[in-house]
Amino acid sequence: MDKIYVNGMAFYAYHGVFPEENKLGQRFFADVILEMDTKGAGETDRLDKTVNYAEVYNKVKEVMEGEPVNLVETLTERIANSLLDTFEKVDAVTIKVIKPDPPIPGHYDSVAVEIRRERS
């Protein structure tokens, strides 16, 4: 299966379990892999044979900057469902949501959740 990558999308949002996360907000990043057949697009050079990357970004942004949730797991699941519901040419998605500054003590780069969902 062919793959399209949209990586390093950055957002400011209000997700988290703690009240200060919902009030102050924080940075989130997302990487998306779309699995689909890109042969038609490659052979014809036509956008309607693939997915528009700007539309993918906007769908992720809509979820990321939308209704706050407690868990990164929930946020990741909502992004996957939104993309599969929107882009019928996509057979599967892998979503990685990165939370670089969660309010937990210790030294680390980030926490992240990655899921893969297929069209049923």
Image: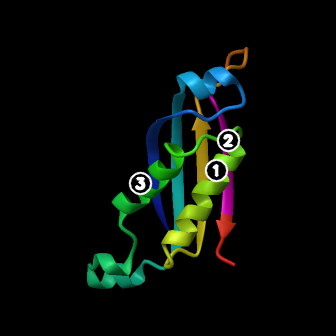
N-term-proximal mark, 1 vs 3: 3
The amino acid sitting under disc 1 is: Thr
- At mark 3, the secondary structure is helix
Q: Is residue 112 magenta?
A: yes
Magenta region, residue range: 108-116
How far apart, in angstroms, are the residues tagged by discs 2 and 3? 18 Å
55 or 46, which is in the foreground? 55
Q: Please report contact status of discs 2 and 1: CB closer than 8 Å, yes or no.
A: yes
Picture coordinates of residue 17, whole percent (x, y): 72, 30
Residue drawn where x is 53% and y is 64% of the image: 83
The label on residue 105 is: none
Which residue is label 3 attached to?
57
Q: Secondary structure at mark 1?
A: helix
The residue to which callout 2 is attached is: 72
Q: Residues within 10 Å of mark 1 (few under 14, many from 20)?
A: many
Assign the N terminus to one quadrant of the image.
Answer: bottom right
Of the pair 95 and 87, the residue shown nearer to us = 87
Residue behind mark 1: 76
Distance from disc 1 to disc 3, alpha carbons, whole Å, reads: 14 Å
- Asked if residue 78 is positioned above or below residue 103 in the image, the reply reads below
Say above or below: 56 vs 44.
above
- In the visual, does 80 lie left or right of 36? right
Q: Main secondary structure of the magenta part?
A: strand
x then y, percent, for residue 34: 52, 65
Q: Amino acid at mark 2?
A: Val
Q: Does residue 94 appear in the picture of this structure?
A: no
